[in-house]
Image (cartoon, rainbow, N blue to C red):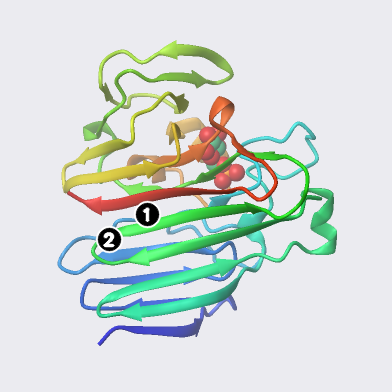
């Protein structure tokens, strides 16, 4: 029997625990952030640092942080990197169990203090559809009477066993910006890792794969032509919060995004839905 239960982490954060015949999952109200997803009979599909302390107010270093309503640094350097939504308390609006499929919808009320970051009249939701695949959608509706634009990402962290053995594929035809330089044309379909990698891809096809010693993870996107491929390597690992020095060896981020020329443009009344589907192939 599928179940959806409210739980509290020992450090105080509330989360929703999902258990079905097809998967197990854990989603925190803070940030509407999933940090655990395991299809039945397969290894977990998301990575979280063992250094994470799950303290209220700091985003969890792993799973799928929601970067909204901007990705990366804001033009105002006083604003937080990757937006403010990942550390705010979302609320569960709907949960629906149908056979062994669970759907959860989280909403975010913009607090008065956060109006400085987001003064627009919009609605934002994160939807999870949990089967043997993890589907996450970030839905934006423009409820106001003026045009709104934003950037965003579903900043997914994946367990890849050994960064030296990882082959990321599905990049041919795309271009990327890295460390503020570019755009560069992607050479070939495949990306290997032997240094810090922080590429913002555009003109990217809808499906990439991560070939790891433990299997192939498939990451596909809808309503997104951009994605971020990130591994901090040795030096940056030592500077990152809630991250162990050696963590770069076992993780990579492949983030479904709407960034650069792929940003979300919403006319009054319009809705945009960014979706990523993640599964073991
Ligand atoms: O430490 P944060 O704010 O979670 O960011 C982690 C990384 O997120 C990635 O998406 C960026 O491309 C990196 O440059 C950044 O370091």
Res 44 label? 2
Residue 268 screen position, x and y as percent: 70, 46
Front in this rendered view, residue 13 or 224: 224
Vertical position of residue 92 compared to residue 62: above or below: below
Front in this rendered view, residue 159 or 270: 270
Residue at position x 71%, y 66% from top? 109
Query: In this orientation, does residue 139 appear?
Result: yes
Vertical position of residue 114 compared to residue 167: above or below: below
Q: CA distance from mark 2 to mark 1?
A: 8 Å
Quick check: 197 left or right of 53? left
Disc 2 and disc 1 in contact, CB within 8 angstroms: yes
Res 19 label? none
> Which quadrant of the picture is home to ligand 1?
top right
Ligand 1 neighbours mark 1 (CB distance < 8 Å): no
Residue 41 screen position, x and y as percent: 15, 67
**Quarter of the figure with the N terminus:** bottom left
Vertical position of residue 254 compared to residue 134: above or below: above
Residue at position x 67%, y 35% from top? 73
**Residue 193, quarter of picture:** top left
**Residue 263, quarter of picture:** top right
Q: Which residue is mark 1?
A: 47
10 Å crowding of disc 1: few (<14), some (14-19), many (20+): many
Residue 21 screen position, x and y as percent: 21, 77
Residue 259 screen position, x and y as percent: 56, 33
Give the structural element (helix, strand or loop) at label 1: loop
Query: In this orientation, does residue 240 appear?
Result: no
Residue at position x 49%, y 84% from top? 6
Residue at position x 35%, y 74% from top? 102
**Residue 39, quarter of picture:** bottom left
């Amino acid at each position: 029997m599928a179940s959806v239960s409210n739980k509290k982490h020992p450090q105080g954060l509330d989360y929703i625990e999902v258990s079905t015949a097809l998967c197990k999952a854990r989603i925190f109200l803070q940030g509407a952030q999933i940090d655990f997803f395991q299809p039945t009979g397969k290894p977990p599909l998301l990575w979280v640092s063992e250094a994470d302390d799950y303290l209220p107010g700091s985003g969890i270093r792993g799973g799928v942080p929601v970067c909204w309503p901007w990705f990366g640094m804001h033009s105002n350097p006083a604003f937080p990197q990757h937006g403010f939504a990942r550390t705010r308390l979302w609320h569960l609006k709907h949960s629906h169990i149908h056979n062994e499929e669970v759907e959860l919808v989280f909403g975010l009320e913009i607090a008065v203090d956060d109006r400085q970051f987001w003064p627009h009249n919009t609605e934002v939701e994160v939807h999870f559809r949990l089967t043997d695949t993890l589907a996450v959608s970030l839905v934006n509706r423009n409820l106001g009477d003026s045009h709104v634009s934003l950037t965003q990402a579903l900043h997914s962290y994946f367990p890849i066993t050994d960064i030296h053995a990882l082959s990321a594929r599905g990049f041919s035809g795309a271009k990327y910006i890295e460390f503020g330089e570019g755009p560069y044309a992607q050479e070939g379909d495949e990306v290997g890792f032997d240094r810090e990698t922080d590429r913002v891809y555009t003109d990217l096809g809808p499906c990439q794969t991560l070939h790891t010693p433990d299997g192939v993870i498939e990451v596909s996107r809808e309503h997104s032509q951009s994605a971020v491929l990130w591994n901090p390597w040795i030096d940056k690992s030592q500077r990152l919060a809630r991250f162990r020095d050696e963590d770069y060896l076992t993780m990579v981020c492949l983030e479904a995004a709407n960034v650069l020329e792929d940003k979300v443009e919403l006319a009054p009344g319009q809705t945009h839905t960014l979706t990523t589907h993640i599964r073991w192939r």
